[in-house]
Amino acid sequence: MTDQYVLASSSPRRRELMQQIGLSFIVDPADIDESRRRGESPQALVRRLAVSKALTVAKRYSRRTVIGADTIVVQGDAVLGKPGTEQRAAAMLAQLSGNSHDVYTALAVWDGAKERGLVRVAAARVTFRTLTQDEILTYVHTGEPLDKAGAYAIQGRAGEWVTRLVGDKETVIGLPTAALQTLLQHIARSEGR
Ligand SMILES: Cc1cn([C@H]2C[C@H](O)[C@@H](COP(=O)(O)OP(=O)(O)OP(=O)(O)O)O2)c(=O)[nH]c1=O
């Protein structure tokens, strides 16, 4: 049997969550520019990036269902993506320390056979206790934050800092599986063009 879906993501967390719910899929990441456009709201940004990942990869396949996702952390006016460097990671964590922030994950599903797509943005709110400079630096040196939006992994050591979580932990990790299953069911039941 051929794999049913194409996951347009390089994220090992997304792959694991897809496996956990028993979906059969191949992985083919999209490499897109993730910068925010001037005046773009966080929800519009995360939605556009998930759609762009799904559609970029959909061009490589005909008649397959492709899944794209994007996760951002938002505090006040700041959108925190992946820090990339230890310095930026430390600055992001100092900003999140002792505060609440929002996490948005967008899921985009494109059905190449039907030429139809669906998108959904899920939100969660996370509160961190106050972190010492020592804790931040020790964490940054583990390397865990570098490829994570907002410079932390709730499923990793940073999970200990969370004093409150409103919403689904999977939204924070980067792939809310219940929402994904609902989208896949809707697209499977929908009429083609
Ligand atoms: C906040 C948070 C983010 N993350 C991860 C999820 C995503 O992999 C990453 C956000 O970056 P994304 O750009 O959404 O994803 P990615 O670059 O890892 O993969 P791709 O673009 O190929 O799909 O941060 C966690 O694993 N745990 C967390 O607690």
Image (spheres, rainbow, N blue to C red):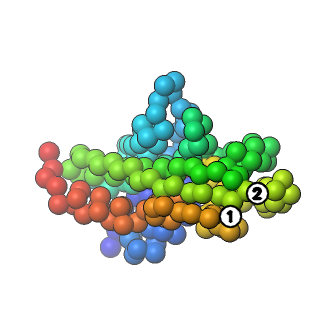
The C terminus: image quadrant: top left
**Up-down: is 122 above or below 159?**
above
Q: Tag 2, which secondary structure?
A: loop
Q: Residues within 10 Å of mark 1 (few under 14, many from 20)?
A: some
Q: Residue at x 28, y 52 (%)?
A: 111
Between 1 and 105, the residue placed more toward the observer is 105
Q: Tag 1, which secondary structure?
A: helix
- Measured from the top left, where is residue 192 in percent x and y? 15, 50
Which quadrant holds residue 157? bottom right
Whether residue 29 is visible to the viewer of this picture, yes or no, is: no
Q: Residue at x 35, y 61 (%)?
A: 179
Taking the view exactly as shown, the residue that stands out farthest to the right is: 134
Q: Amino acid at mark 2?
A: Leu
Between 29 and 97, the residue placed more toward the observer is 97
Residue behind mark 1: 161
Q: Amino acid at mark 1?
A: Trp
Q: Which mark is residue 131?
A: 2
Is residue 59 found left or right of 29 in the rendered image? left
Is residue 79 found left or right of 180 in the rendered image? right
Badges 2 and 1: C-beta atoms under 8 Å apart?
yes
**Up-down: is 185 above or below 122?**
below
Q: Residue at x 62, y 64 (%)?
A: 163
- Measured from the top left, where is residue 112 in percent x and y? 28, 49
- Measured from the top left, where is residue 59 in percent x and y? 37, 43
